[in-house]
Image (tube, rainbow, N blue to C red):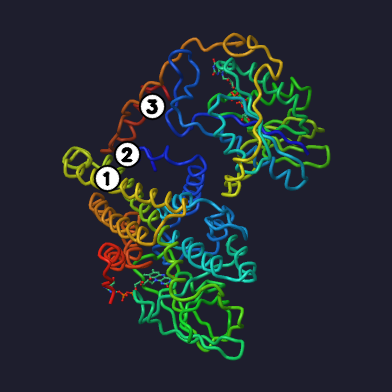
């Protein structure tokens, strides 16, 4: 099975994250950039399928030059090769444009199965799998907590608020996964050392036949007009119980309009 | 090298591969060691086999060796891994040192092809655990006078004697045992289930409690001829293994110190006395500054030795410089950090006292500080003052 995993480089969600003041995009320059956490689960799932059924696993990333570090990290877990879409014109791309570019790249990769994270920690829009599936004209099995492959049939347990739904589809298809699906492996030292030698193909917009005007700020279907920093957390009120603590608590909740 | 403590910005001197190896070991230690190590320490036991398998999966065991399932990483990468392991616990680092640098290295460097095939692949995965028996009850710093004997009996060898303070001995599958023969010191790969071999655990240790230590009794242990390591001739063979392991300690001890300093730094900035954080007192800042300076010096020294090792130019006396300085300073840092934590400094809820106690063992094993002073002294003066 030919599997492509979508991997996005994002600013570490454990650290302070910012938007740039000049163009309102995510500040990737000063951030510690890592693999979008959910995508590690996507990689693990792809590797497990390859181990059980054979085939090949390819990483596909759209991102700036420095995303190569995350690509190497992804490859160190075990995938065979990577494709990196990098082009200055991509800066400022919206989700719609991103899906166009990724779908164009997927068009050259002949995947039986595309696996991605259910959401990214910087965008958090959860739209990529749907948009890509739509563009490719294939099924979208989203929000999986379990994936079974039986020949050309995929069965997914789709996580919902109440429980899960079972959905099936034929390949080719796009599957997005939650972090409940598996336990991603640590990259082994051999994997880390082998990743250096694995092929990483870079593709420009021209290689994909996508015009620069269709992406970036020019092609954005929506724009971030303004942003401001979250106000600093205020001290909060501390209620010491000196007999009337309960009353004070209720008063507090009432003035804050919680009750 | 966590950001505020990386005063000299050493991170960019590492390759991307080295940083990735460091980061994955740090992650593994955060996930699998940190949450449990205080309990292991208090109870004086450690799930060594489980850890060995986890470490094997990653490629930590014999990571600087090539072939036979070993990762073949650089000396610097190995050092960085030791730093992260020992930031977790010196006992956990000891498990990896003894397996990779002592037992596996001895077989890899001095063993026959059959011995390598038999032991190394399963030791690399952590399925088989090794130990290294040099020290004896009556012969520690002076192994040349060892009493354990190996005599020929037909084609066989028969071993008699005892080894003391042997890390992993009670759980080991194979022991690399050093013994005196008529031709001088020789090494043997001894399956620990051979009749006549017994390994008892040493209890009541106040240091390195998350590590298994034992005593080995060798009572007329009969071994086939092919148990002897053919390339190991004389005492320089086990000493070369110790140089390998000491190199790991040069890095490891810095890891323990870093963990102490990170803890003390965090504590000093949050704990308030006399209306201000401890970090706001000049006396505390002087301590923190002096410790951070020693820490980065130790890291620089380790990195320098690592680059020498990767260039094939590392000399044993240079490793002695590193072991002497870094363990001594790490212990000083651990003790100083303990003072900053006040009463909490003696608690197992914080890692500091555990590290300090561990470093007492690290100061003694793999050549005591005094022995390394004598090595450096001999190099400087040309005069041996050992005996
Ligand atoms: C209204 C709007 C305006 C935006 N404006 C800007 C802007 O001005 N400037 C700007 O920089 N960004 C902007 N963005 C962010 C934009 O770049 C996309 O949201 C983002 O690239 C798409 O992915 P996501 O992470 O949000 O998608 P999600 O659907 O949350 O991601 C799901 C999965 O898709 C895959 N994936 C997502 N992106 C990639 C990728 N690049 N390569 C490989 N796999 C990927 C991953 O597997 C990921 O786990 C905007 C987004 C929106 C919704
Ligand atoms: C937890 C732990 C694990 C260990 N694991 C192993 C293992 O796996 N394998 C193994 O073989 N050994 C192991 N050892 C043993 C360790 O290597 C020895 O303890 C060490 O070599 C010192 O020997 P000793 O304890 O007999 O001390 P001694 O040699 O008796 O030394 C006592 C003191 O005298 C000093 N001294 C000795 N000779 C001189 C001299 N010429 N000049 C000046 N001072 C001198 C020493 O520096 C020391 O301060 C371990 C020890 C510990 C504590």
Give A175 or A23, whichever is nearer the viewer: A23
* Same subunit: marks 3 and 1: no
Above or below — where is A102 with respect to B159? above
The numbered mark at residue B293 is 1
Residue A258 vs residue A196, the one in the foreground? A196
Q: Circle 3 sits on which residue?
A: A253
In the image as oriented, which residue stretches furthest toward the bottom? B153
Question: SS class of the residue under badge 3?
Answer: helix
Mark 2 vs mark 1: tell me if same chain.
yes
Mark 1, chain letter? B
Front-most of B244 and A3? B244
**How far across and how far down the image is residue B4, in percent?**
34, 38
Residue that appears at 27% across and 62% down: B380
**Horizontal and vertical percent for residue A26?**
49, 21
Which residue is identified by label 2?
A: B7
Q: Is mark 2 within 8 Å of ligand 2?
A: no
Which residue is pictured at 79% across the width and 31% down the height? A172
| Residue depicted at x 63% and y 69% | B113
């Amino acid at each position: 099975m030919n599997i492509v995993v979508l991997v996005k480089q994002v600013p570490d969600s454990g650290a302070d994250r910012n938007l740039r003041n000049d163009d309102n995009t995510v500040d990737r320059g000063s951030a510690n950039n890592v693999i979008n956490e959910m995508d590690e689960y996507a990689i693990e799932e792809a590797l497990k399928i390859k181990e059980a059924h054979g085939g090949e696993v390819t990483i596909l990333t759209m991102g700036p030059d420095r995303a190569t570090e995350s690509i190497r990290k992804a490859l160190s877990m075990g995938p065979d090769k990577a494709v990196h879409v990098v082009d200055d014109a991509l800066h400022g791309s919206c989700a719609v444009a991103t899906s166009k570019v990724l779908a164009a790249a997927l068009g050259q990769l002949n995947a039986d199965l595309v696996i991605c994270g259910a959401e990214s920690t910087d965008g958090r829009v959860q739209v990529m799998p749907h948009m890509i599936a739509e563009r490719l004209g294939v099924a979208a099995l989203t929000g999986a907590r379990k994936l079974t492959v039986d020949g050309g049939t995929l069965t997914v347990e789709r996580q919902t608020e109440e429980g899960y739904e079972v959905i099936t589809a034929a390949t080719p298809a796009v599957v997005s996964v939650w972090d409940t699906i598996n336990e991603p492996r640590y990259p082994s030292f051999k994997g880390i050392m082998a990743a250096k030698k694995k092929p990483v193909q870079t593709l420009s917009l021209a290689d994909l036949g996508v015009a620069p005007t269709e992406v970036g700020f020019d092609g954005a279907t929506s724009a971030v007009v303004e942003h401001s920093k979250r106000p600093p957390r205020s001290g909060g009120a501390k209620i010491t119980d000196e007999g009337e603590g309960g009353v004070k608590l209720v008063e507090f909740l009432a003035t804050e309009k919680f009750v | 090298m966590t950001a505020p403590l990386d005063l000299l910005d050493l991170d960019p001197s590492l390759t991307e591969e080295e940083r990735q190896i460091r980061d994955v070991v740090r992650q593994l230690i955060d996930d699998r060691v940190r949450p449990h190590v205080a309990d292991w320490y208090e109870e004086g036991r450690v799930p060594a086999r489980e850890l060995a398998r986890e470490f094997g999966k990653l490629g930590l065991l014999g990571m600087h060796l090539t072939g036979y399932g070993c990762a073949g990483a650089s000396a610097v990468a190995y050092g960085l891994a030791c730093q992260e392991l020992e930031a977790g616990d010196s006992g956990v680092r000891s498990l990896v040192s003894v397996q990779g640098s002592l037992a596996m290295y001895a077989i890899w460097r001095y063993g026959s092809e059959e011995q390598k095939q038999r032991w190394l692949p399963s030791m690399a995965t952590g399925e088989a655990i090794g130990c290294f028996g040099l020290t004896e009850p009556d012969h520690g710093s002076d192994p040349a006078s060892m009493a354990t004997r190996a005599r020929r009996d037909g084609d066989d060898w028969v071993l008699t004697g005892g080894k003391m303070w042997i890390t992993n001995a009670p759980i080991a599958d194979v022991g690399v045992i050093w013994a005196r023969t008529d031709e001088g010191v020789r090494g043997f790969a001894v399956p620990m289930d051979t009749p006549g071999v017994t390994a008892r655990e040493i209890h009541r240790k106040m240091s390195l409690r998350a590590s298994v230590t034992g005593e080995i009794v060798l009572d007329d242990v009969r071994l086939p001829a092919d148990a002897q390591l053919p390339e190991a001739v004389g005492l320089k063979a086990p000493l070369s293994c110790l140089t390998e392991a000491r190199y790991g300690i040069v890095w490891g001890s810095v890891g323990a110190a870093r963990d102490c300093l990170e803890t003390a730094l965090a504590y000093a900035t949050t704990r308030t006395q006399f209306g201000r954080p401890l970090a706001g007192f000049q006396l505390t800042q002087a301590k923190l500054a002096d410790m951070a300076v020693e820490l980065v010096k130790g890291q620089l020294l380790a990195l320098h030795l690592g680059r020498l090792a990767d260039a094939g130019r590392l000399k044993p006396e240079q490793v002695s410089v590193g072991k002497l300085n870094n363990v001594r300073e790490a212990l000083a840092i651990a003790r100083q950090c303990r003072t900053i934590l006040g009463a909490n400094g003696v608690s197992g809820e914080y890692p500091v006292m555990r590290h300090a106690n561990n470093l007492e063992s690290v100061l003694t094993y793999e050549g005591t500080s005094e022995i390394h002073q004598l090595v450096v002294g001999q190099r400087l003066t040309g005069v041996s003052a050992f005996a």
